[in-house]
Amino acid sequence: MPRNAAAKANSERDLIRIDDQLCFALYATSRAITGLYRPVLQEIGLTYPQYLVMLVLWEHRTVTVSELGARLYLDSGTLTPLLKRLERQGLIARSRDSEDERQVNIELTLAGARMRRQASAVAGSLKCRLPLPEQKIRALRTELNQLLQMATGEESA
């Protein structure tokens, strides 16, 4: 096999190695990190996706399903069952918008607002389990947000 052909074959093999895949590194890291959240969130009765919804609501109090989906990169088919479970838990209330009945508003209930205090321990617990300097965390978050913007075609904020 000619030298260039061998180099090309090795290069092509490297392209399909799992350890060389950015997507796999991101996927595995995401699963590992969310796994660290699981026991802490179980203590307050939330799954990780429910926690993400609650984070948005603790920040904004009321959002539409479409705003929530855009913020969390989730479609309504994924959000609807998740929101129904949160509503059954008494943490949110869903209602049709009075001006546009196609829109469904999601609002934090008093119980949901009170849960914020319990949930504030979640981030602190993760810092103990993942001891990275704050500067490194900020740098990683910045790089990941930039990658997300490139992958989704969003403009920089």
Image: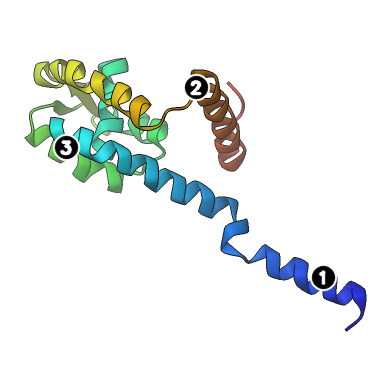
Residue at the spot x=31%, y=16% of the render?
60
Image quadrant in which the N terminus is located: bottom right
Q: Which of marks 2 and 3 is in front?
A: 2
Which of the marked residues, 2 or 3, is nearer the chain's N terminus?
Answer: 3
Q: Distance between the residues labelled 1 and 3?
A: 50 Å
Residue 108 seen from this side: yes
Residue 103 seen from this side: no
Q: Which of 144 and 90 is in front in this view?
A: 144
Which of the marked residues, 1 or 3, is nearer the chain's N terminus?
Answer: 1
- Density class for disc 3 (Cα within 10 Å; few <14, some 14-19, many ≥20) is few
The residue tagged 1 is 8
* Image spot of residue 39 (x, y percent): 21, 38
Mark 1, secondary structure of its residue: helix
Q: Which of marks 2 and 1 is in front?
A: 2
Horizontally, residue 122 falls left or right of residue 73, namely left
Mark 2, secondary structure of its residue: loop
The residue tagged 2 is 133
Which of the marked residues, 2 or 1, is nearer the chain's N terminus?
Answer: 1
- Visual colour scheme: rainbow
Quarter of the view holding residue 18 = bottom right
Q: In this view, does 100 lie above or below 79?
A: above
